[in-house]
């Protein structure tokens, strides 16, 4: 029988949260990460509504400290009612549809893609009809081969960021209960307990992308990410990558394709510029994978680039194309159109430091022709 919304109101976290606690609607509460999250969230003073579509897991969720909620994410009306009844401050989407046998993951690509698209859209709609609580949603920190799951990840990230939410990009889990109980997976990876701890810490993060792995734990500011997603070329995982030169809704309406390679941008510093009200200084590193090329764009900023590793090719409109190696620099003024920005190598990564001065709150990246 298809489960409908059932909120028992029972569990050790029942009642009002303490002064600093929040009401957290956890979708995917019986998953490996969900079961690690519940006791940590409760210990932090939060009330957890743990959603599952399996009646047999209701008792487990209660024992872990959640108020169990029986609901299928694909039953849109029941989901909306369940979220309304719980009245959360935060919706934490940890939903996946994966098999117990790792060898069968490929057979579940369409199922997992559906839960990341239709399921995520239903959660967003439930949030909109319940006072728009903050949304956090999980994706992956590694590049997926082109296919339904990769496209679903791109759509999930776009839609969550457009709602002012937080994307959690996890490395491959290892540890008890995961696919990797006895061996370490290839990076990016993260122990399941550390992933849960970092997720609890991320509840207070502003909108953006957070990468949770042992190799890299960074957060990304929405200012750069949606604009570049809208330009349909690069997808960002650091703190500074553009979000908003193109509006989030415009990016979704365009039906943009999933980028096939990823640029990683890691924030190092963000400070108001002393003596210049309304201006700020930003510093971040950019990692270009082999063969990577960014779209034509310009910055509302004065930009200085210093190459750290590998070699990159840069050109602004009207200028000469130059190949920069470690120790060499490049400059753009606010009116320059950056027509070439790519890794010079198809086999080696490149990395450079960016120092940028711009008007506080202004878009950092503007896609152009």
Image (tube, rainbow, N blue to C red):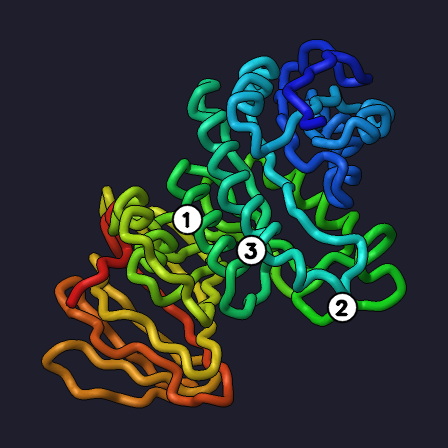
Which residue position holds label 1?
158
Horizontally, is 76 left or right of 108 in the view? left
- Mark 3 or 1 closer to N-term? 1
Disc 3/disc 1 C-alpha distance (Å): 18 Å
Q: Element at badge 2?
A: loop
Above or below 28: residue 97: below
Q: Residues within 10 Å of mark 3 (few under 14, many from 20)?
A: some
- Mark 2 or 1 closer to N-term? 1
- Label annotation for residue 185: 2
In the current view of this chain or complex, which residue is farthest to the top?
Answer: 15
Task: Nearest to the eye among marks 3 and 1: give it.
Answer: 1
On-image quarter of the C terminus: bottom left
Horizontally, is 167 left or right of 194 in the view? left
Above or below 246: residue 83: above
Disc 2/disc 3 C-alpha distance (Å): 20 Å
In the current view of this chain or complex, which residue is farthest to the front?
Answer: 1
Q: Element at badge 3?
A: strand
In the current view of this chain or complex, which residue is farthest to the right?
Answer: 182
Q: Are marks 2 and 3 in contact (CB under 8 Å)?
A: no
Residue drawn at point x = 70 percent, y = 22 percent: 69
- Label annotation for residue 262: none
Residue drawn at point x = 68 percent, y = 15 percent: 18
Residue drawn at point x = 76 percent, y = 18 percent: 13
Q: Quadrant of residue 360?
A: top left
Above or below 366: residue 46: above
Q: Residues within 10 Å of mark 1 (few under 14, many from 20)?
A: many
Whole-percent x, y for residue 118 in the image:
50, 41
- Mark 2 or 3 closer to N-term? 2
Q: Are marks 3 and 1 in contact (CB under 8 Å)?
A: no
On-image quarter of the N terminus: top right
Which residue position holds label 3?
218
Horizontally, is 161 left or right of 66 in the view? left
């Amino acid at each position: 029988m298809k489960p409908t919304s059932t909120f028992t109101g029972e569990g050790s976290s029942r009642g009002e949260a303490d002064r600093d606690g929040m009401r957290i609607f956890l979708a995917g509460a019986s998953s490996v990460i969900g079961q690690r999250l519940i006791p940590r969230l409760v210990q932090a003073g939060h009330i957890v509504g743990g959603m599952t579509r399996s009646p047999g897991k209701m008792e487990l969720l209660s024992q872990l400290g959640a108020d169990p909620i029986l609901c299928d994410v694909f039953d849109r009306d029941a989901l909306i009612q369940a979220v309304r009844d719980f009245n959360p401050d935060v919706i934490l989407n940890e939903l996946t549809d994966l098999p117990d046998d790792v060898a069968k993951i490929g057979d579940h690509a369409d199922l997992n893609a559906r839960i990341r698209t239709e399921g995520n859209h239903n959660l967003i709609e439930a949030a909109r009809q319940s006072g728009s609580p903050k949304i956090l949603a999980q994706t992956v920190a590694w590049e997926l081969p082109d296919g339904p799951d990769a496209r679903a990840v791109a759509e999930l990230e776009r839609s969550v960021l457009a709602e002012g939410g937080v994307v959690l990009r996890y490395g491959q889990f290892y540890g008890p209960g995961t696919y990797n109980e006895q061996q370490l997976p290839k990076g990016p990876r993260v122990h399941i307990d550390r992933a849960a701890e970092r997720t609890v810490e991320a509840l207070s993060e502003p909108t953006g992308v957070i990468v949770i792995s042992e190799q890299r734990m960074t957060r990304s500011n929405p200012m750069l990410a949606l604009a570049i997603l809208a330009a349909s070329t690069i997808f960002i995982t650091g703190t500074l990558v553009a979000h908003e030169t193109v509006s989030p809704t415009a990016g979704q309406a365009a039906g943009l394709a999933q980028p096939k390679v990823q640029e990683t941008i890691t924030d190092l510093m963000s400070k108001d510029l002393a003596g210049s009200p309304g201006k700020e200084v930003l510093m971040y590193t950019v990692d270009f994978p082999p063969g990577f090329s960014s779209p034509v764009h310009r910055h509302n900023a004065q930009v200085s680039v210093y190459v750290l590793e590998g070699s990159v090719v840069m050109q602004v409109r009207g200028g000469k194309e130059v190949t920069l190696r470690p120790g060499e620099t490049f400059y753009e003024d606010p009116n320059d159109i950056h027509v070439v920005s790519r890794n010079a190598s198809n086999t080696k990564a490149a990395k450079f430091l960016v120092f940028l001065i711009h008007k506080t709150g202004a878009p950092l990246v503007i896609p152009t022709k």
